[in-house]
Image: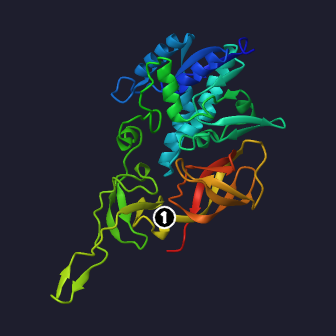
Amino acid sequence: MNKNKRIVVGMSGGVDSSVTALLLKQQGYDVIGLFMKNWEDDDNSEYCSSRQDLLDAVSVCDTIGIPIEAVNFAKEYKDRVFSAFLSEYQAGRTPNPDILCNAEIKFKAFLDHAIALGADTIATGHYAQVREVDGLFQLLKASDSSKDQSYFLHRLNQTQLSRALFPLGKLLKSDIRKIAKQHGLSNHAKKDSTGICFIGERPFREFLSGYLPTQPGEMRTPEGKLVGRHIGLSFYTLGQRQGLGIGGIKTSSTVNKKHDHQTDALIQHEPWFVAAKDMANNRLIVVQGHDHPALLSPGLSALNAHWISGSAPELNHLYAAKTRYRQADAPCRISSFTSDQCSVSFEHSQWAVTPGQSLVVYDGEVCLGGAIIENSISEPV
């Protein structure tokens, strides 16, 4: 039934895309593997694994018995994704390039190439699901909630979803590795990739400093107290704790009345967090304590909205949203919107809502789409 249906699978060299290809081959599809090379600025560095990833992908395709092609999208990636990534960081925001990569490369440049190869559909190893309801395609969360990647796919449109398959959507990650091992795939135990695709395991600040200049300035509290210096606002993100170079400050002490001397028994050292960026004065605003009011936001405004169905969600209806990946769904309501802007209020204040990150809205298991966070609304200090 499926043997005349050609599917091109995006092969990364990892176990998820490998099992995706295997499952489709078992279902009788005419499967072609496609390895995308999206980055080549430092291809010979210790952090770039594209050469090994290609070897792993070729090995898997040989085991499965499908052809594989390698294609270079480095120019498209630099033009459509990386340039926007740098611009956002330079403006003091924290972008999510993997979301843009999915919309512009994996489901645009890759999709166009697959169609040229005669494909009816493309497939990837993303943990998500697609279903058609009354002629509209919906993006759903994966069955494995710990691996769900619908957050990264929320900018896909109807045409892209109509051409996409996510065979892993109903499976658990533990099942994927078992299937890979059972069928002799050489990468069945390969470690999952983490972080931004073109940065890999390298120190982020070190990578970014190769493209953006340092602009040192002051670190101050919201009250104006000078507590340290930063190397450049582009190199920090809201909620950041590590790498600030500020020691703890004693916030309380007691006096032992019996012996009439001070004791350190109850002295606490609260960690520092980035709470805001004062771009006009090149100042990093920092606060002590994870639950400082400056880190909590009861609402936000967002731009560049994209709704998968083509229609905006209902105003003041109770939905759920994430303001960053790996975050629990937060009950919220969309209080206003225009064609590409929306304002959202949360039932419970959210921590470290960060401009440049994505707000992604859900109605149950259905991902409705989202927008790019412009500003957060802070609680009164």
Residue beneath the point at 45% across and 39% down? 195
Asked whether 192 or 338 is in front, the reply is 192
Q: For numbered disc 1, what is the local secondary structure?
A: helix
Q: Answer yes or no: is residue 155 visible.
A: yes
The x and y percentages for residue 117 are: 66, 13
The x and y percentages for residue 99 are: 58, 39
* Total numbered labels placed on residues in the image: 1
Asked whether 158 or 142 is in front, the reply is 142
Q: Which residue is mark 1?
A: 295
Q: Among all residues in the image, which is located at the extreme right?
A: 134
Q: Is residue 223 above or below residue 117?
A: below
Q: Is residue 281 above or below residue 339?
A: below
Q: Is residue 50 left or right of residue 33?
A: left
Which amino acid is tagged 1?
Answer: Leu
Q: Quadrant of residue 268?
A: bottom left
Residue beneath the point at 62% across and 24% down? 110
Q: How is the image coloured?
A: rainbow
Residue beneath the point at 51% across and 40% down? 85
Asked whether 199 or 317 is in front, the reply is 317
Q: Residues within 10 Å of mark 1 (few under 14, many from 20)?
A: many
Asked whether 248 or 77 is in front, the reply is 248
The x and y percentages for residue 92 are: 48, 52
Residue beneath the point at 20% across and 89% down? 257
Q: Answer yes or no: is residue 13 visible.
A: no
Q: Quadrant of residue 42?
A: top left
| Quadrant the N terminus occupies | top right
Q: Is residue 267 above or below residue 181?
A: below
